[in-house]
Image (tube, rainbow, N blue to C red):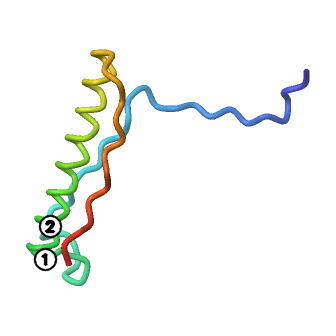
């Protein structure tokens, strides 16, 4: 078996963490309004809760459940 043409990808030992930029250094046209920021933070919290619940179930041998997607409020 030849593998000389195969690509090898090395992953970092830990996932990279995104950081919020200081709002004063972001151009005004790219800043989020307070409502958008609150909605985004709520969705991040919801995603983290789903992941935590799935990890908890995986470590306690409970059957996995697919959680339904939630529609965003307009």
Circles 1 and 2 in contact, beta carbons < 8 Å: yes
Neighbours of disc 2 within 10 Å: few (<14), some (14-19), many (20+): few
SS assignment at label 1: loop
> Label 2 belongs to which residue?
37
Expressed as whole percent of the image width and height from the top left, the position of residue 53 reads 23, 32
Q: Residue furthest bottom?
A: 29
What is the distance, in whole Å, between disc 1 and disc 2 at their CAs?
Answer: 6 Å
> Residue 20 lies in what quarter of the image?
bottom left
Note whether 52 is above or below 32 in the view shown: above
Expressed as whole percent of the image width and height from the top left, the position of residue 45 reads 17, 48
Label of residue 33 in the image: 1
SS assignment at label 2: helix
Q: Residue at x 34, y 35 (%)?
A: 65
Q: Residue at x 15, y 62 (%)?
A: 22
Expressed as whole percent of the image width and height from the top left, the position of residue 1 reads 91, 21
Note whether 52 is above or below 39 in the view shown: above
């Amino acid at each position: 078996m030849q593998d000389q043409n195969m690509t090898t990808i090395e992953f970092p030992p830990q996932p990279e963490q995104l950081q919020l930029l200081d709002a004063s250094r972001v151009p005004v046209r790219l800043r989020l309004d307070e409502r958008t920021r609150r909605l985004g933070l709520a969705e991040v919290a919801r995603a983290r809760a789903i992941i935590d619940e799935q990890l908890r179930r995986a470590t306690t041998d409970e059957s996995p459940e697919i959680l339904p997607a939630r529609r965003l409020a307009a």
